[in-house]
Image (cartoon, helix red, strand yellow):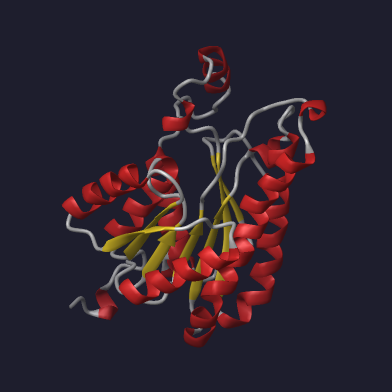
């Protein structure tokens, strides 16, 4: 066993992490990053069991510890069952990464209906609310916990024809700030990490001219990769970030500054 006095402050040895929506894309990279840092990681999916199991098999092939769990993170009953199943198999959840997301079509406001707005709020406000309530008893008992919401730079940039997504991400940002203050006395940190446009599987069919236009604006002169986001999540989940809460970390190569 590692001598605690010599353990890296970035080590997550002995911690259990749940990453929602982690069978592919950014969620997959976050889950792998947390596992490589020593955490036991619960992979979550709603649909696509085969893909989730393939992802977890690749994770296990690295000698990492965890499990794969189905659950709709916008449904109260399923969230309760999901968190209970993780606790039964891996242990109580110490690190919660709220990442699951639906499709986000860009449309003028006249082409949205309220049902779509509500679906955005369900993923980015209701889901963190339900998940946090489920994991808080354990985090409060041990006076340690990490909650990391995955946001988006669209809130800072005010991207047009994207009002439902931008509004929900803004609400998620405000919820994060309020919860950070509320939970600080228990040494539970609550932060939001906001990636820029990082092409993953769901972007394969996006128009090339849109990709080229965005790429030309990135000050660091390269595309971000999922591992850039994973590194930020590992930091926020670790003891190295024990005095960091209520912050919005933009991982976008300088697309938003300040």
Q: Is residue 183 above or below residue 107?
A: below
Q: Quadrant of the C terminus?
A: top right
Q: Nearer the viewer, residue 109 or 38?
A: 109
Is 137 placed above or below 52 here? below
Residue 16, image quadrant: bottom left
Q: Nearer the viewer, residue 229 or 24?
A: 24
State the image coordinates of residue 108 (x, y, percent, origin top left): 77, 25
**Can the viewer see residue 90 in this picture?**
no
Seen as rendered, the residue at the extreme top is 209
Name which residue lies at 22% across and 59% down: 64
- Which residue is more in the foreground, 227 or 256? 227
Residue 183: quadrant of the picture: bottom right
Q: Is residue 114 above or below residue 31?
A: above
| Quarter-of-image position of residue 224 | top left
Residue 120: x, y in percent? 67, 45
Residue at 35% across / 58% down in the picture? 34
Q: Residue at x 52, y 64 (%)?
A: 78
């Amino acid at each position: 066993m590692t001598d605690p006095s010599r353990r890296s402050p970035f080590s997550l040895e002995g911690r259990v992490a749940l990453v929602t929506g982690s069978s592919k894309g950014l969620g997959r990279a976050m889950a792998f990053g947390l596992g490589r840092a020593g955490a036991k990681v619960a992979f979550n999916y709603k649909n696509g069991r085969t893909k989730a199991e393939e992802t977890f098999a690749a994770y296990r092939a690295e000698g990492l510890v965890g499990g794969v769990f189905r659950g709709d993170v916008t449904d109260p009953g399923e969230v309760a069952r999901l968190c209970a199943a993780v606790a039964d198999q891996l242990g109580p959840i110490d690190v919660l990464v709220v990442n699951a997301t639906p499709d986000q079509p860009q449309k003028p406001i006249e082409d949205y209906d309220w049902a779509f707005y509500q679906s955005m709020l369900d993923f980015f406000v209701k889901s963190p609310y339900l998940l946090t309530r489920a994991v808080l008893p354990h985090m409060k008992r041990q006076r340690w916990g990490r909650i990391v919401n995955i946001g988006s730079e669209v809130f800072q940039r005010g991207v047009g024809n994207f009002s439902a997504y931008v509004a929900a991400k803004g609400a998620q940002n405000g919820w994060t700030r309020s919860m950070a203050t509320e939970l600080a006395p228990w040494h539970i940190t609550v932060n939001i990490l906001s990636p820029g446009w990082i092409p993953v599987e769901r972007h394969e069919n996006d128009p090339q001219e849109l990709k080229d236009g965005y790429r030309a604006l990135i000050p660091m002169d390269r595309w971000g990769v999922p591992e850039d986001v994973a590194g930020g999540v590992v930091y926020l989940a670790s003891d190295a970030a024990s005095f960091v809460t209520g912050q919005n970390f933009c991982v976008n190569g300088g697309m938003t500054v300040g």
